[in-house]
Structures are given as C-alpha cells and as structure tokens.
Amino acid sequence: GAEVLIATDDGSVGTKGTVIDCIKENSLTADSIFACGPMPMLRGLKAFGEENEINTQLSLEERMACGLGACLGCVVKTPDIDGHSYVNNKRVCKDGPVFEASQVII
C-alpha cells in the first residue's frame, strides 16, 4: 500500500497549509508528479515541478460545452500554436484533459 499524507488549510488534519507545504514538511521526493485539483494547487505544483526538475502532468478541469473541441469553450493557453484554431490554445476536451505541465500556461 501507499502512504497517504493530508494537507488542510486549518491544520485540523495532517499538514497545515498547501500540498506544497506537505511535500516540503515531509521531505518528499519523486520522479514524477500527477495532479488533479483546483487551479491554485495545480499552479503551485507546476512551479514546484519546474523548480525541482520533476516531470509534472496536470489533469485540467474545464467546462466542456460541446465535448468535441468545436466550440473552443474549454481552451487553455499554451506556448505552442494549436493546429485547429491557429492560436496558442489547446482544447481540454480534445487534446487533454491531462497535459505535461510545460505544455500549458496556467
């Protein structure tokens, strides 16, 4: 089994603070980070992964109006041009929802 660590804002259970605080408090190391959750947490994990040269994959949660990629309602900014809309976007419903952290600007 895996060890489960918990972080809560008020410290009522586990580490008081963010998931980053929990990682640092417990001196955790990893080859990869896989994350799904609120955008502030994903931003923090993306930055932590970049700072520590850890491969990071993020599962993004966006409203998906059509679910087919046609409406572009679920786009996320990217450093590269999208072949569908020819702008710096990727469609979460069609191109994701999981992205390498380096492939999205959040």
Image (cartoon, helix red, strand yellow):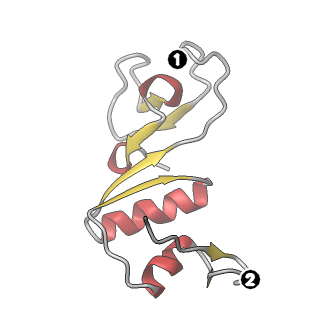
Q: Which residue is depicted at the point 32% across and 64% down?
A: 50
Rendered location of residue 46, percent (x, y): 42, 59
Count of marks placed on residues? 2
Rendered location of residue 55, percent (x, y): 29, 56
Tell me the amino acid under the disc marked 1.
Gly
What residue sits right under mark 1 in the picture? 69
Q: Which residue is depicted at the point 39% across and 41% down?
A: 99
Q: Is residue 48 above or below residue 100?
A: below
Looking at the rendered image, the quarter that the N terminus falls into is bottom left
Q: Which residue is depicted at the point 26% across and 63% down?
A: 31
Q: Which mark is residue 12?
A: 2
Q: Residues within 10 Å of mark 2 (few under 14, many from 20)?
A: few
* Quarter of the view holding residue 32: bottom left
Rendered location of residue 87, percent (x, y): 42, 26
Horizontal side, residue 48 vs residue 53: left or right: right
What separation in Å lies between label 2 and label 1 (alpha carbons)? 42 Å
Tell me the amino acid under the disc marked 2.
Ser
Horizontal side, residue 28 vs residue 25: left or right: left
Horizontal side, residue 10 vs residue 44: left or right: right
* Quarter of the view holding residue 48: bottom left
* Quarter of the view holding residue 56: bottom left
Rendered location of residue 82, percent (x, y): 37, 25
